[in-house]
Structures are given as C-alpha cells and as structure tokens.
Image (cartoon, coloured by chain):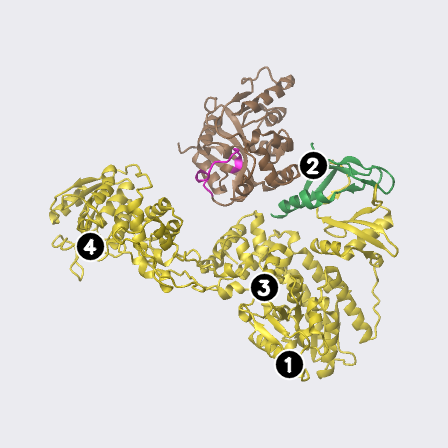
Amino acid sequence: MSGPPGLYEQEALWKVTGEVVRPGGLEMTDRLVELCGFRAGDRVLDAGCGAGAAVERLRSRGLKALGIDPSEVLLEKARRRFRNKDDLLEPEASFSPPFARAAAEALPFPDACLQGVLCECVLSLTDSMEGALKELHRVLAPGGSLGVTDVYASLPRDPAREPPWPVRCCLQGAVTRREVEAKMRQAGFEVLVWEDRTQALKELAARLVWAFGSLEGFWNSVCPEPGETGLTRRASEGRPGYYLLVARKVGSDF
Amino acid sequence: MKPAYEDPTPPPWDCACGKELEKRRVVLTYMGNEFTVELYQCPSCRFVYVPEDLALGKMAEVEKILEDK
Amino acid sequence: MDQKELRELEKRCIQEEPPWCAAACPLHVDARSFAGCMSRGDWEGARKVLEKAMPFPGVFGRVCDHPCQEKCKRGEAGDPVAIGALERACVQAVSSQAPVRALPSRGRSVAVMGGGPAALVVAWDLARKGYGVEMRVRRNELGGTLRDFPANLLPPEVVREETDVLLQLGVEVHAGCSLDGALLEELRGRRDAVFIEVEDDIGEGWGLERDEKGGILADERTRATSLPGVFAGGGSRESVILAAARGRWAATSMDRHLQGVSPTAGREKEGPCETRLFTSLEGVDALPVVPPADPAQGYGREEAMEEAARCLQCQCLECVKICPYLERFGGYPKRYAREIYNNESIVMGERKGNLLVNSCSLCRLCEEVCPENFSMADLCHAARESMVSRGKMPPSAHEFALRDMAFSNGEKCALFRSQPGHPSSAYLFFPGCQLSASAPHRVERVYEGLCSSLEGGVGLALGCCGAPARWAARNDLLHEALEAFKGRWEAMGKPKILVACPSCYQVFKEKLPQAPATFLWEVLETTLEPLEAAQPLRQVALHDPCAARHEPDLLDTVRRLLQRRGFDVEELKTGGVLTECCGYGGLMANANPPVARAVVERRAGETSRGFVTYCAMCRDRLARAGKPALHLLDALLEGVDTEEAAGRKPPGYSQRRENRARLKRSLLKTLWGEEEDVAVEEHESVVVRMEPDLEELLEDRRILAEDLRHVIHEAEKRGRKLVHRETGRFLAAFKPAAVTYWVEYSPSEDGFTVHNAYSHRMEVLERGPR
C-alpha cells in the first residue's frame, strides 16, 4: 500500500496498546462475538486482523477464524504467532494458511462463503467505506453477521475535503453515526445493535498521555516528520467517539 | 499487562519506617477508569510515592481527558 | 434552553452578516475579501474571489456599474473604496484562475434567445450544470449590448475570449438569427425551457404578457413569464450587472423547473438585500480615495494596494473587542453558540467546548455593546445547567468555589442573630462572604454603626447568598442555601435586608423576591454624618462591579457618596452600564485563571489612577493586579487612611477563611457575650509556617493552610511519611475529600515549616492490578 504509513503499524503505538492496536482490546471482540451469535464451526473473517490476536481469540472460541490485512509487516507477526501454536491449527481447516494479504475492498473469497465478518477499527481506514461494505456484503452468506467497531465523528465532516494526514489512522476517515448507518443500509445490511464505546477511546488517549507525556508528544512520535503536526487539534475536530455495531446481511441496493 | 507508566528514577526518599522504596505495580483510578502504573512503594507500609512532576504533569493531563465527558 | 431557543439566540449575532458591498451587489460578489487580497498584492487570489460569484469576470469586472460602491461603509469616513476600478485593474492584469468544468449531461436542454449579458450568464450557468444549451443571437457574434461599450473599456477581443468558453462547454451558437414569436414557439417545442434576453422592443406580439413599461412581464426574482417554461431578463442599459444577475436567477429557476422542484425555496437572500451587519466607525479617520496616477491606464500594483487598504474590512466583533474571554477563544458569539449547541446535542463533550462554557463571567457586557443584544451569559448559563443535569460538568471546574461557599455557610462562619437586646429586627445586615473574608473589621464597624443609627433592631447574618452555586448552575445547592436563609429570615420577622454586595443583591432579587433587599449604601447615605474630605488619597477611578450594571439608583448613590467625601472620581469609558468584570463573576477565575487574569489586567490598565469600588472581590482582584484599590467602606468610614487602605494586600484563600471564622467569633464575644463552643478539630491546632514565595505558589495551586495542616497532622499521628535521604525533610499525603494533597515539611520550634505542596485528583490504590 502506498502513501503515508499507517498509525497502526507504528511501534511507538504498539508499546502502549500491546498487540491489540485499538481501543477496547479483545473485550470488544468478545462482545461482538456475543452479539453476533456465532456457533462453533462458523467461518468468521477478521478483516484487518493485524498481528492476529483477535483471530487467535476467535479460534479459541471454536470458530473457523481467518484474517486478512494489507500490512505485510503485521501479517508476518500473525503467521509467526500461529507457527508457534500448532495446536490451534486444525488440519481440516478449509482455508489455510489462515492469513492472507488483502484489503477489505477486494477480498480473496468466493461469494457468500462466510458466516461472519469482524471489522474492528478498520472501516474508517479504508479508502472507500462503501467499497469495503460492498465486499463484506458479498462474501457473507445470507443472514450472516457483520461486527464492527470504529471511530465516529459527533460533528458532520467531509474527510475528502481535508488535507491528508502524515500518518494514516482511523480518525482521518471518521464520519457521523447517521452516515455510517446510511452506508450500511445502502450496502444491504440491517443494523441490529449500536453501542457507544467512547469511553474506550478516552482510555486509550489517557494511556497515550501516560506513555508520551501529552497527546502532542504521541503524535510527534508516530509521525514520519516530527515537529508541529497539528494532529492533536485535527484529531479532536469532529469530536471523535467510538462505537460498536452489529449488522446482518439482507438485500442490497447494488 | 504492561503498566501505562513506569517511574524511571529511584527517588531520594525512604519510608519513615526505615525501609527503602521499591518499584511496584499499583493502580491509579479516576472517574471509573483504572490504570496500572509502576511507582515506588514502601514494601511494608505500602505508602506509594507520587512525584510532583507526575502529579502536575501526566496525571493532571489524564484527569482532564477523563473529566471532559 | 431548547434547540429552538438556541437557534434564536444564535441568530442575534450578526458577525456573519454580509458587508454592505456584498449585500448591495446583485450577485453578492465578496468585495470585502476581494479588497483584502488586493491590499496584500495578491491579485490571483483577488481574481479567484471574483470568480466565485461573478461569471465572465474579464467582461463584468471591466464594465460593472458597481452598486456596491454606493453602499460602501468607507463612504461614511471619506470616499467609498473604488471597487469598480480595482476590479477592472485586477481582471486586466490576471487571467482566469479556475478550470472550466461541467457536470455530466442531464439529457435535457434549453434555449436562449439573445446574446447579451443576461443571456450569456444563463448559458454559462446551465451549460456547467450539464444542460444542453442552444443560443440564438441577432448579431454576428456573442455579446449583445456588451459590444456597445467603448473599445478601450471593453475590447471586443476580450468579449470574444471570455465567451469562447461557452463553445468549450458545447453551447450551440446560431448567429444572425431573427428573434420572433415563431422562433419562440419552435424552441418551446424542441427544448425543455427557454430564456429570452429582454432588450429594447423584444417580445412584442410573442404571446407573452407585458408589464406596465411595455417590456415582458417577469417575476423580479424567478424571472418566470406568463408562459410556463419561458423565462426572461435583461435591462443591461440601466445596469449591466443587474442584467447579469437576472440571467443567473433565471438559470436557477430554469434548473429548478426542469427538476420539478420549488422555484422559490431558499432564495430569500438572492439579489440586492439589506444586511444586519454593524461596523463601528469609532477611531476611523476619514480618508480620501487614492486615485490612479494615470486614469486611462487604471490602477497599478502599488496604488491598488494603497486604495484597497482603505477598505474597512467591515466586521462587527463589538463584543470581542471589549472582552478578553471572547477574544481568547478565537471566534465570536455565533460560532460559540453553534459549538455549544453541538456540544449540547451529543453525548460527548470536547474539552474546549466545556472550557468555553465555564469561562464566561456572566457579566452581560456583551449584551450591552451588541447591536442585537446577544447574551453569552444566557447561552453559557443554560449550557452549564444542561451539563449539570446530565452529569457532564467536569468536577474540577467549580469545586473549589463551592467548597468555599460551603465553608461560609458552615458552622465556623455562619451567623444569624438579632441585635443584642432586640427580640425582633426591622433590618438584617448581610455583608456577604467576600467582604467578611476581605475586610472583617470594616464589617464589624458598619454593623455597630447600623445598630446605633437605625430603629427597630438590626440583625446580622454572616454567610454566603449562594451566588457561586448559581454561577455553577448547581441549583440544588443554591436552593438549599436560600431555603435555609429564608427560614431564618421568616422566623426573624421578615426584616428588610441590607446588602453590601451587588451580587448578593442580584441573587435575592431574582431568587428570593419575597425578601426584598436594599443596598447598604442607600441607608448610609441617609444615616452618615456630614463628612470631611477623605485623607490622603482622593484621586481615584471608579470601577462599578458588573452586578451593578442595571441598577441605576445604586450607580447614582455611590457617586453621590464619593462626592460628599470629596473624592475626585474619574469615570471610566466602560463604567456604569458598560462596566467590565473583574474576572471573579461566573466563577471565571475558578474555571479559567489565565483568562480571568487577562480580564482584570485589561481593567487595571485603563487608568493611571487607583480604583474605588464597592464589591470586595473586585477590590481584591484589582489589588492583586497591582493597583491601589479602595473598597467604598474604606472611602466612607471616618478616620481611615485611604492611601494605606488602598495599598492593603488582599488576603489569600486560607486567610479569607480564617477571617470569616474570626469575625464570627469576635462578634459573638463582643456583642453577644458568647464564647463559641465549637469543637476544634485536632489538625487545626497544628502550626505551619512558610516562605512568602511558597505562599504565592500555594495560592495559585489552591492549596489552603487547612489542607497542609490536615496532611501533616495525619502523617505525624500515624507516622506514615517519607524521609529525604539528604535533607531529612518529610513528605506525606492525605485525601480529605476529592483531592489528594502532598506536603513536604520539617519540624520547627513551635510547629512545622512547609517547603512545598502539590495535589492531584487521581486516587492511588496501594494494591496492584487484580
């Protein structure tokens, strides 16, 4: 992937968040699994799986989990993780290895082959949320579940009209709840659950302050060009919040 | 879990009970949020030392972030 | 405040109203921004501004009849800005900045009869919107009446160059046509809408209704004629820019007609209109126009910059000019209202939004200077109430002040007594918590004076009226304080309340109307003996506390009293109803100390004299800002050295509490012969001392002497403290309520010496993670 580096790829951030580089950590994943109502043996994709912690979690719950991510760096970490944990690899897994390099907008799977997709802190990172949702819709079996966590903006904003960020992160693409739900509907999803989880975002911000002294200090550490990034201000414009959403595949406008 | 913060410098303070302070994991809490940090603590009295620059610096920043709901 | 009320309030701020030039322009060209760019020598930027609203800038920029200049506000202070000439210079020197882009074809098309200014604009607008355009013109080329301008003003090649862009957009141009009723019918049949440029005798006998002037009847704004789908506009011989605008309005109508949407919705601001903007001309010198050296050539670079710099860049910002708080946040009330409104209607608050709401002093000066009486106080107070009711008020914003209020109404300081030897009371003196804290001896003296000069008994009530709770929107605490007061006031026989503080007065007036309050000063005016002139300081500037703003009687009384005492009083420009706040009101000093400091420093800098004022907080804050400051009591009481009194250092937070408590003890003893039997808490007997520098620091950190004593007492009692390896000093911590205090100290002869202290709100659990 070309362009500025991803925030989620920065070591400085991993040092604070640990392996699960997003607000809420694996508790969010657990909550999504609970709300999606997956059954043992269901095929569930973690779109944007990063270093594979959530895939591991899903597998430990008896799901046939697999992951895709555009970042080769993180996928390497994910593969290494599983190389050391042979007991979790099921010989009869129909998709193996369980990790592939791909972006949510172009999934390497046939139509309607998955019972579930989790998309955690990913949608607002995609180049096209509509494109990603269309693909996610395609690969889900009818009635399949989509579990999403992501940032959202409390004030309307148009990400396309803003200059690009020096480091790509989900805050850049945050849109309002209304927009998220509209895009879901357009892509053929019925939204079943929306939970506000802004507290998790605040907690992550607090941890970043602990580690870097201030949010300004954090942004300086993760940007390729240090100095006045203006990102502290940009990050808070639009009043970011964090949400958890579960939707079901129904019809489609496409 | 890795602590959110670790006090880097051994302090010039000892506990009044005579023991030297040791680096230990303690929990800070505010407005329902908990953070595990490593600060210097007396192993027997359990008194935790909060340095001034931490209290007025990062702690104050975090308090503000959590307060502004 | 509900959303509707918020919207109404937001509307009152006129900062975003257009300047007169833009409002007068039929196309609403932003001549203000244009002049701004020109004054900076940014001609490309200036052209871009023109291009936003003006079609064919090369043409209209040269020949516009500039109705904007007639309305230019600079014309009230010299000559109006030569906007027309500046535009001409700009478009002559700079070519088009924006690429020409059209929307994809809509599969619909229109016809335009005529090739003059109105017709050209219709073609330009609709072609860019993706409509097919067929133009039928009488002359051999496009331009119509534009071709009649003298060539030196509007060269024919410019007209051709500019109108060529229509060909680029795929407009079909048929020259040399005969424009008649038959053509109109034909075009109506083939195309979805038709525009007719009205010049001279066009339209006679075409089946269209005529107006009284004999031209085609068309609605002024929508340009619709009596035939559906046929629109008309022109009139370039009177005003070429108006003709162009009519073309634009027609194009909008035609677009809407073809989409089947309302022809009129949202078009109220189209065309020349009024503006509610206000711009003060105070301090603006009249300047004549800067003419170009060579009128034939027009403005050169330097001259244009000079002329454009005469533009006033009309804004309102009257309130921002006068209030450091409004200025500090970099915006103006309309923007703030939107920010606060958005903060209101969502779950999450952003730090700046909360600080904005909590930093207003609620002094209402903005209401006075705003041409439309916008009220930040109403907005912010309503927002605070909403935050409190939803549990979103950050605890640290007002906690310290509310703690102080609780202390004033607590056992140690509160008092409610009838005059000794008087079972009932006709009057009740209520000095207020800050006067008691700042000048307890004055309070004693005044009370004794009232007792001897008034008949019927004068009771005394020491405590806080609840103003801090009111400002913090803690209606629960306010209600509590007032109910308690009311109960005792009723039990005392409903005496007439004498207040010294204008803020107390406002609280009683609004929240306890059944308990009428009178100003102490009005009583003093009748009871004070004839006075000699005060000594030695008599030259002062008068600072009216903000709560006195709308009390004309009080404002007069104070002035008369000062006059009687021989004071030479300087009236401040922002005095009386326009008075500025000292930074204490609304708990500004609590929530945002830097802004409060800016506010009082601004006030302090407005005179070279010292101040006299009649609110204890105003007095103390002005004194802290380094000015000699008298309280009115210092000025009126006999035997007071006014120079010394003005120089008195204001007490810090700890001393204030001490003063209130001592006042109660002293009065109880001397007047009622009672020794207070209040249990002294153990920690209060601990003696602490510190260097003056440290006192200042702890004042800023809002750490009271009481807090220090508490920590040291607990540490010594339990032996729980740290010892410095080199200095042997102790360091201990204690959390009496919400805040943990840390104190570095060492034992001294009679108690302890404090070396440092700090605090935090976060709680430290002594255990590890579970």
Residue linked to disc 3 = C603
Q: How far separated are the C-alphas under marks 2 and 4?
A: 78 Å
Foreground residue, C606 or C491? Answer: C606
Looking at the rendered structure, the kind of residue marked 4 is Ser
Earlier residue among tags 4 and 3: 4
The colour with which the image depicts chain C is yellow
Residue C108 in view, yes or no: no
Mark 4 near mark 3, Cβ–Cβ under 8 Å? no
Q: Disc number at residue C180? A: none
Q: Position of residue A2 (x, y in %)?
A: 48, 27
Residue linked to disc 2 = B5
Q: Nearer the viewer, mark 1 or mark 3?
A: 3
Residue linked to disc 1 = C525
Range covered by the magenta-colored residues? A157-171
Q: Residue furthest top?
A: A91
User: Residue at point 62% right, 58% down?
Assistant: C597
The colour with which the image depicts chain A is brown
Q: Nearer the viewer, mark 1 or mark 2?
A: 1
Looking at the rendered structure, the kind of residue marked 3 is Arg
Looking at the rendered structure, the kind of residue marked 2 is Tyr
- Looking at the rendered structure, the secondary structure element under dot 4 is loop
- Looking at the rendered structure, the secondary structure element under dot 3 is helix
Label 2 environment density (alpha carbons within 10 Å; few <14, some 14–19, many ≥20): many
Asked whether the residues under marks 4 and 1 belong to the same chain, the reply is yes
Residue linked to disc 4 = C226
* Quadrant including the C terminus of chain C: top right
